Image (tube, rainbow, N blue to C red):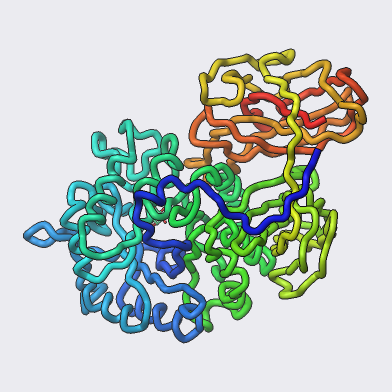
Amino acid sequence: MLSLLTTTAGVGLALPWLAAAVVHTPTPPMGWNSYNYYNCYPNETIIKDNARGLVELGLSAVGYDVVTPDCGWPSKNRTADGQITWNPELFPSGFPALGEYLHGLGLKFGLYSGAGVWECTPDNGDATVGHEVEDAHTFAAWGGDALKYDNCWANIDTMIRFVDYNPSEKDPSVRFAAMSDALDSVNRSIVFSICQWGVGQDLGVWALKYGDTWRISNDIQDNWKSIWRIVNQAVPYVKHTGIGKYIDMDMLTVGLGALSYEEERFHFGMWAISKSPLVIGAPANASITSEESLAILSNKDVVALNQDLLGEQAQLIRRYTEEEYDIFAGNLSESRKVIGVANWSNSSKSVNIDLQLVGVQKSGNIRDVWAAKDLGQYEGAVKVDLKGHEAKLLILPVSAQLIYDVEPLYYPAATGILQGDAMSASCGGGCLPKGSKVTNMTVGSSVTFSNVSGGVLGGMKLIGIDYINYDVALASAWTNGTNTRNFTLSVNGGEPRRWSFPISGGDWYETGRLDVLLEGFHVGSVNELRVEAPGLDPGADLVGLAVYT
Ligand code: GAL
């Protein structure tokens, strides 16, 4: 069933864009941005103080070097010859001088504009749409090293809403492509960070062509539930990310005061292993931002996970919704893996991680990154103790890697017995592997599979659930949007168990797979497996089940 392979590296990734595209930022950018603390009210003193703070607190030495005044920096009107310009009351020395100041400190100058007509608050001034080439030249002339490019007032036809979650435009990528081309035409390397929040379909497919990083979600808020929402939205992008192409999970809220110590470490660690840019949103000022938070941001070992040269986004390997924890894993350079064990629950727990889950038979010395402790060598499994809301990060040197050569049996959802509102729908090649799915899984609707194989052993089985969830929290990000849909699964009339399914891809056709372990199988093809939308909200669309007997 499983074979062993002695591995030399977790490399060999197919990165089709690398051959053609210029890599502006081989590892995720790191820096500081004014928005999370100063909102749209930056000024010269604020930016300079924080820039000096980054240097004095040692944060720039850890890698945080791009300093970005976010919204609120420009003059309300362009110059007589149409150039975007700074607000002289807020920035009396001007932007070229600010660029020089930052460069003098060994930092980089990040600029902010947008693919719309105005900044999000029109009084804050113009954005760039229609002025791409001029603005790219202006930003380069000011010594700009990076550009965060937002999406407000983008619906040029109607101009009715500053944020439009249902735009009439067919293809948002056009506005971002125009700026990407303009930046390519200037004689300066400028990292391009798309901030389109994931409105419309297939962000992962188009954004990597134009951006070095791209925001996948609506804004982070300074609360714990934002972390769950954004992590669930990040999951499917493992298909699209790689060296020089990173998802942006938004600026860090570490140090802003709402998260507990464990929650701040959880947030920072998850952003790090997901290869999100690490952009500090708290003041770089020891008298405002606690020592604990500054120590989290300064943790070189966690930052090294983010800056690993393989650039691989850690993947959701297993989810245990009722037990409230997840296991993420990803390859690191030098034949290592990182495992993130994320405890979403308020209470502490001990979990036993089967190393087979991450394809490892034997590990070298496992390192607990936050504890800065070596745990020794492991074969088979490793036990981890977690506090409430703790995410443990483990590094494993991999000496022997498992290859799974088992073919599962596949049960397409449309062959099950549908109850409630469930109905089958075709979805072409989109919902692989079968091209059909069961949709409309309202509360209480279900799909029951009969004669499911329990193999020759019965007992516990690994089931790959192919599903589709594109219920993206845009407007609902501000209330209780979670980016998840739920199903319960039960075997042979046993107790139903619930799983939360994260976003699966760029539309209602793109399939994701969540692997779960289910007990209670009998030997042979005699089992009944029921998938039901529990009394929470609608279930995901169901494509089929892969049962590993
Ligand atoms: C939002 C963006 C935020 C911040 C804000 C400024 O659209 O997602 O990160 O830049 O605009 O108004």
Nearer to the camera, 378 or 251: 378
Q: Residue at x 34, y 67 (%)?
A: 110
Q: How many marks?
A: 0
Seen from the viewer's position, the closer of residues 322 and 15 is 15
Name the side, left or right, on which 182 lies relative to 60: left
Q: Quadrant of residue 448?
A: top right
Quadrant observed for ligand 1 in the rendered image: bottom left
Image check: 491 left or right of 320? Answer: right
- Please say whether residue 232 is visible from this viewpoint: yes
Image spot of residue 188 (x, y percent): 25, 65
Q: Quadrant of the C terminus?
A: top right
In the rendered view, tell whether residue 520 sits above or below residue 295. above
Q: Residue furthest bottom?
A: 56
Q: Is residue 202 left or right of residue 372?
A: left
- Rendering coords of residue 396 (x, y %): 72, 62
Q: Percent from the top left, x then y, of residue 489? A: 78, 29
| Residue sitting farthest toward the left | 80
Q: Is residue 102 above or below residue 237?
A: below
Query: Visible in this render: residue 71?
Result: no
Residue at 35 percent across and 34 percent down: it is: 167
Residue at 79% from the left image edge and 36% from the top image edge: 462
* Quarter of the N terminus within the rendering: top right
Measuring from the top left, give residue 374's x and y in whole percent: 77, 73
Q: Residue at x 49, y 35 (%)?
A: 506
Q: Nearer the viewer, residue 504 or 479?
A: 504
Q: In this rendering, is residue 71 above or below 174? A: below
Residue 80 image-quadrant placement: bottom left
Q: Is residue 363 left or right of residue 484?
A: right
